Amino acid sequence: MAKPPVTASLKFEQELCGQGYRLIAGLDEAGRGAWAGPVSAAAVILPLDREDLAEVLEGVNDSKKLSPERRAELAPIIKRVALGWAVGRVTNQEIDEKGIVDATRLAMERALRKLDQTPEYLLIDALTLPEEVMPLDRQMRIIKGDQLSLSIAAASILAKVTRDEFMVGLDEQYPEYSFAENKGYGTATHRAGLERRGPCLAHRQSFKPIMTWQRLL
């Protein structure tokens, strides 16, 4: 049996606390590579002065490394512990209009705007946001940040759990594609639905696999 992932580190957060920052938001997305549905992003501000924070959030790591059951266990703990959290969503139509990278940034911006407190610094998985959202000297782009920063890891879990719940709901509207199972990713069940019915209104028409199906219709 594979070992569960270790809890992500507070190294980056602690370094920033040493520079005087207190409200540090971790941001991450879910659904960037899916063929259907929205992209979601979460922002999480943790109470970094809490001495038992790593213990209370034991096991919080990159959402992709966790089972759906474990994510479902951790999400309410993160929400209860966090000083603030929010999730932003960008529709598949907006993804087609803006492109997936800009749409992902927009989802993060929407999450930030929904926070009750304004962050002083942003830790972001693999991206930076426009200067007007936060000065670039108060953003840190961290490759594999969802494995390296506890704040980003917490955001990755909330973004993933929230989007998965949305896709389960979408499955009721479009049962042919097994969205409750595949969450809009290009699995065999999703491909089978496309072969039977072709794309639906929930699909990202600008994505190459869907454009290919459109040409075959």
Image (spheres, rainbow, N blue to C red):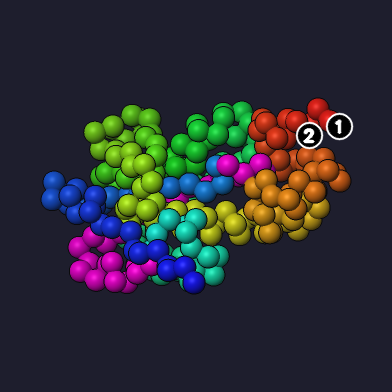
Q: Is residue 164 left or right of residue 66?
A: right
211 on left or right of 114 = right
Q: Amino acid at mark 2?
A: Trp
CA separation, marks 1 and 2?
Answer: 7 Å
Res 114 visible: no
Q: Residue at x 33, y 59 (%)?
A: 8
Instruction: Return the residue at label 2.
Output: 213
Please, is residue 29 above or below residue 134 in the view? Answer: below
Measured as percent of width and height from the top left, residue 144 is found at 38, 46
Classed neighbour count for the residue bearing mark 1: other residues with Cα under 10 Å, few (<14), some (14–19), many (≥20): few
Q: What secondary structure is marked by label 1?
A: loop
Going by the image, does 89 lie left or right of 126?
right
Quick check: is 52 in the magenta stretch?
A: yes
- Residue 56, compared with residue 149, is above or below; it is below
Residue reaching furthest front? 1
Residue at (35, 30) in percent of width and height: 132
Task: Tell me the SS state at disc 2.
Answer: helix
Residue linked to disc 1: 217
* Dot 1 and dot 2 residues touching (CB under 8 Å): yes
Residue 44 within the segment the image draws in magenta: yes
- Which residues fall within the magenta stretch? 33-59
Q: Which corner quadrant of the image does residue 90 belong to?
A: top right
Q: Tag 1: residue type?
A: Leu
Residue in view at x 39 percent, y 37 percent: 127
| x 42%, y 67%: residue | 4
Does the rendering let one see residue 47? yes
Tell me: 6 left or right of 19: right
- Check residue 83 in the rendering and tell me which mark sits there, or answer none: none
